[in-house]
Amino acid sequence: MAFNNSIATRFNVGTVVVLALLAMACGSSASTTSPTNACSPTPTNPECVNPPNLLTVTIRNGAYTPNPVTVRVGQTVNWLNSDAIAHSATDPGVFDTGSISPTSAHSANGDGVTFNTVGTYQYHCTFHANETATVIVTQQ
């Protein structure tokens, strides 16, 4: 009888170990196909490439989006031209991006406009007077 109990005990222990290993493998959520730095595009980071203090306004079909865009003091806004024609973003006496080439986020002033003063800024496209939008700057 001792011999049969020993075999039964080994069988039961072996079964428990195998079942435990299977359970651990099934419960694993690791995946080699999912990205390690997933990003969900937002209206101010449509390409998931912006650092935290850079917000993007997209120009598409002659409209600025988002409009208005709200930023905190010290944040920078860049304009991404998704149209096939040049645009700009200008608030006379405050900022002027210059011409932004089609399908580009690069403007004449480099990486965008940094807003350091609380306020509401109305801007427009110098090439298309009907294209207008607003930047609202709030305290940090």
Image: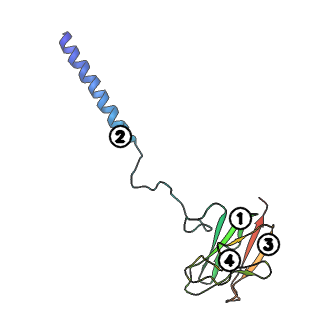
Residue at image point 63% right, 67% down: 44
Label for residue 109?
4
Residue at image point 31% right, 27% down: 16
Label for residue 75?
1
Question: Disc 4 vs disc 3: which is toward the camera?
Answer: 4
Q: Are marks 2 and 1 in contact (CB under 8 Å)?
A: no
Q: Earlier in the sequence, mark 4 or mark 2?
A: 2
Between the residue at mark 3 and the residue at mark 2, the CA separation in whole angstroms equals 56 Å
Residue at image point 73% right, 72% down: 135
Amino acid identity at mark 2: Ala
Q: Earlier in the sequence, mark 4 or mark 3?
A: 4
Q: Tell me the SS state at disc 2.
A: helix
Question: Disc 1 vs disc 4: which is toward the camera?
Answer: 4
Q: Tell me the SS state at disc 4.
A: loop
Q: Which residue is mark 3?
A: 120
Q: Are marks 4 and 3 in contact (CB under 8 Å)?
A: no
**Residue 15 lies in quadrant:** top left
Residue 64 place in picture, x, y as percent: 65, 78
Q: Tell me: 61 left or right of 35.
A: right
Above or below, 127 against 82 in this view is below
